[in-house]
């Protein structure tokens, strides 16, 4: 029996299978069998008489060889092919929309799916003009196929309108290791497609009915037409973001919400960029071609936010400039704009003015309480201070941090850390004679800021915080001399040093205070600083009982490496603990 000529619908299904095999998304044998079954069943449903050779697996395999020849630009494969195959390959390369339309017809996609696809592409064309909708849409069926298989989806993606389900789809394709391995060549495009589709569903809570879709987003529109309060940043056509607030952001399909302000969004997104592209991000330079440094040491920064080690991110910039900085980082790190989705809302001008003040004066303390307010917010809203006074106090804390880092004090950070470390830094500073002299020369500027800061910490932690000895400040205008802080008792310092030296296992603060119960907490704190005690995991050690941290770190890294090599990239907490103790006990 002579085989009938191939049709367009058959050719597009074969091309789809070719790319699935080419990109290692499925077994060649499995896909060939599936295409053969589909085409034979299709012929039967159309009343075509078939025999054992009609579109059988051997025939499908040969046709795939013809596609290999066409897609490889006549380099490998079977050169004798039909004009139809040449036309369909050309269509695939040059007209994504036309190819997808025929493919949907071949798959028997219903009107709902077709209209959803059309609406999504129109929406994407408006929201992100630089993204090619038809190209991006091509990757959604890959995500759909996997999510249906593992039961994340119970219906086709284009028929699913539940926002929570689509969010799980975006999360699955970005985090499932098996899926990422199978699709490693195009995983970024798949994640980007899922991410954009999730944003689309959020923008249209009810996708059906579709009769009004053309009215919802005019194809010729050049500005986003909102059907909800949320908008999406268009990196290709950025406008002013004055009087706006961010709602959420997603990076490579992983969504985070809520975010309270643009500074928080900037810091969190930058941390993700730095994790993936640390080698590409410039240090001590502007993310633009010129300008002040955006990332590096805190020296010279107005509102530095700690990122890692001694590196900080300058955040004293407007919402519009924050997005411009993010766009610059996308170019620097070679990140696709589709991998980052930022949602925001309009708000009242009065709110924007308030936020702008906070971005210039905000100093925060790391805490598990989402309701924590920044130091400047507390000064303004709780203490009822003027904006200028708020800025003055925060500026004093920032300059005090710079002094602590430049002079290598035991504790160096105040903002962006927990209260214990912040208080430790304040104690170190007020125990430093040179710093006290600077404070006195500047009319008690720093000690006044510290007093307010300790009061702020007490507000955040009503259950109590460690006491810090900060001299009282006279409120008289002529008061210029700050009472001197009592120096650490040499007798107590020597006793404490001997007490710590006698213990190789370290001593907790509670045990130290119990042992020296005749002294006040402030006296013990000063003695701990004076004898240069080392604090590790809430225990204090004499400096002679603990070796260099770098050497210990190298040994621990060596232990980890050997365990990973021996166990195929795996270790357990128990095994690590056993081996580390054997190697590290010598340091204590």
Image: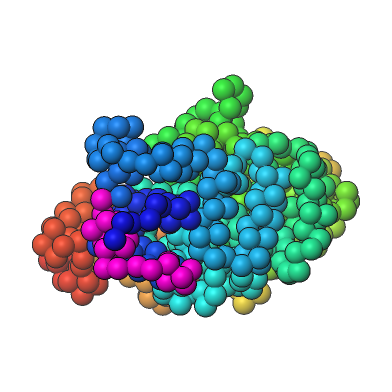
393 shown above or below 93: below
How far across and down, in percent of the image, does residue 483 sit? 65, 49
Measuring 54% from the left and 70% from the top, which residue is drawn there? Answer: 156
Measuring from the top left, give residue 266's x and y in whole percent: 61, 47
Q: Residue at x 80, y 48 (%)?
A: 218
Camera sees residue 441: yes
Quarter of the figure with residue 401: top right
Segment tinted magenta in the rendering:
43-62
Q: How many marks?
A: 0
Residue at horizontal 54 percent and vertical 53 percent from the top: 102
Quick one: 463 or 434, which is closer to the camera?
A: 463
User: Is residue 367 visible to us here?
Assistant: no
Q: Percent x, y for residue 150?
A: 41, 74
Where is 442 relative to 191, above or below? above
Quarter occupied by the C terminus = bottom left
Image quarter in which the N terminus is found: bottom left
User: Viewed as shown, does residue 223 lie left or right of 500?
Assistant: right
Taking the image as shown, residue 534 lies to the left or right of residue 265, namely left
Residue visible at 35% across and 39% down in the picture: 71
Q: Nearer the viewer, residue 581 or 176?
A: 176
Residue 59 counted in the magenta span? yes
Does residue 530 appear left or right of residue 205 in this picture?
left
Location of residue 477 in the rendering, given as x and y in whole percent from the top left corner? 84, 43
Residue located farthest toward the front when viewing the structure as drawn: 1
Specify whether residue 13 is painted magenta.
Answer: no
Q: Nearer the viewer, residue 212 or 37?
A: 37
């Amino acid at each position: 029996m002579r085989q009938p000529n191939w049709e367009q619908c058959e050719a597009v299904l074969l091309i789809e299978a070719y790319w699935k095999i080419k990109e290692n998304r499925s077994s060649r044998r499995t896909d060939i069998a599936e295409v053969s079954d589909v085409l034979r069943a299709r012929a039967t449903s159309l009343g075509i008489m078939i025999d054992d050779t009609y579109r059988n697996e051997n025939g499908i395999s040969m046709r795939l060889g013809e596609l290999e020849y066409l897609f490889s630009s006549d380099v490998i494969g079977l050169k004798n092919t039909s004009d139809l195959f040449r036309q369909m390959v050309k269509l695939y390369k040059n007209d994504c929309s036309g190819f997808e339309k025929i493919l949907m017809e071949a798959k028997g996609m219903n009107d709902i799916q077709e209209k959803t696809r059309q609406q999504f592409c129109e929406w994407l064309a408006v929201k992100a003009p630089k993204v090619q909708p038809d190209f991006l849409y091509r990757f959604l069926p890959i995500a759909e196929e996997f999510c249906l298989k593992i039961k994340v989806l119970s219906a086709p993606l284009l028929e699913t309108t539940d926002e929570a389900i689509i969010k799980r789809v975006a999360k699955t394709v970005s985090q499932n290791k098996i899926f990422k391995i199978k699709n490693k060549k195009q995983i970024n495009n798949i994640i980007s497609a899922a991410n954009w589709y999730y944003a689309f569903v959020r923008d249209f809570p009810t996708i059906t009915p579709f009769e009004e879709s053309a009215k919802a987003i005019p194809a010729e529109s050049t500005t986003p037409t909102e059907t909800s309060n949320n908008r999406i940043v268009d990196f290709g056509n950025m406008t002013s973001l004055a009087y706006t607030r961010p709602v959420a952001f997603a990076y490579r399909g992983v969504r985070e919400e809520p975010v309270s302000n643009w500074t928080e969004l900037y810091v969190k997104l930058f941390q993700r960029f730095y994790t993936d592209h640390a080698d590409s991000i410039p240090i001590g330079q502007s993310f633009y071609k010129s300008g002040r440094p955006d990332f590096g040491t805190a020296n010279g920064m107005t509102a530095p936010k700690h990122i890692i080690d001694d590196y900080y991110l300058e955040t004293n910039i407007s919402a519009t400039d924050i997005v411009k900085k993010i766009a610059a980082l996308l170019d620097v790190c070679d990140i696709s704009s589709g991998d980052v989705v930022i949602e925001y809302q309009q708000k009242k001008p009065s709110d924007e003015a308030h936020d702008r003040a906070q971005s210039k004066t905000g100093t925060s303390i790391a805490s598990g309480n989402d309701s924590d307010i920044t130091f400047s917010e507390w000064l303004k809203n709780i203490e009822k201070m003027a904006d200028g006074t708020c800025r003055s106090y925060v500026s004093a804390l920032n300059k005090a941090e710079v002094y602590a880092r430049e002079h290598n004090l035991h504790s160096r950070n105040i903002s962006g850390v927990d209260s214990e470390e912040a208080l430790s830094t304040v104690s170190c500073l007020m125990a430093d004679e040179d710093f006290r002299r600077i404070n006195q020369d500047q009319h008690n500027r720093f000690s006044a800021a510290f007093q307010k800061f300790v009061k702020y910490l007490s507000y955040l932690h009503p259950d109590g915080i460690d006491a810090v000895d900060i001299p009282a400040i006279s409120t008289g205008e002529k008061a210029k001399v700050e009472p001197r802080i009592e120096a650490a008792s040499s007798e107590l310092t020597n006793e404490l040093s001997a007490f710590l030296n006698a213990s190789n296992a370290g001593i907790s603060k509670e045990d130290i205070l119990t042992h020296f119960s005749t002294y006040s907490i402030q006296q013990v704190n000063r003695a701990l600083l004076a004898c240069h005690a080392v604090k590790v995991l809430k225990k204090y050690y004499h400096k002679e009982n603990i070796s260099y941290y770098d050497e210990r770190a190298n040994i621990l890294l060596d232990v980890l490496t050997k365990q990973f090599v021996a166990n195929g990239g795996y270790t357990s907490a128990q095994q690590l603990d056993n081996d580390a103790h054997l190697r590290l006990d010598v340091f204590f």
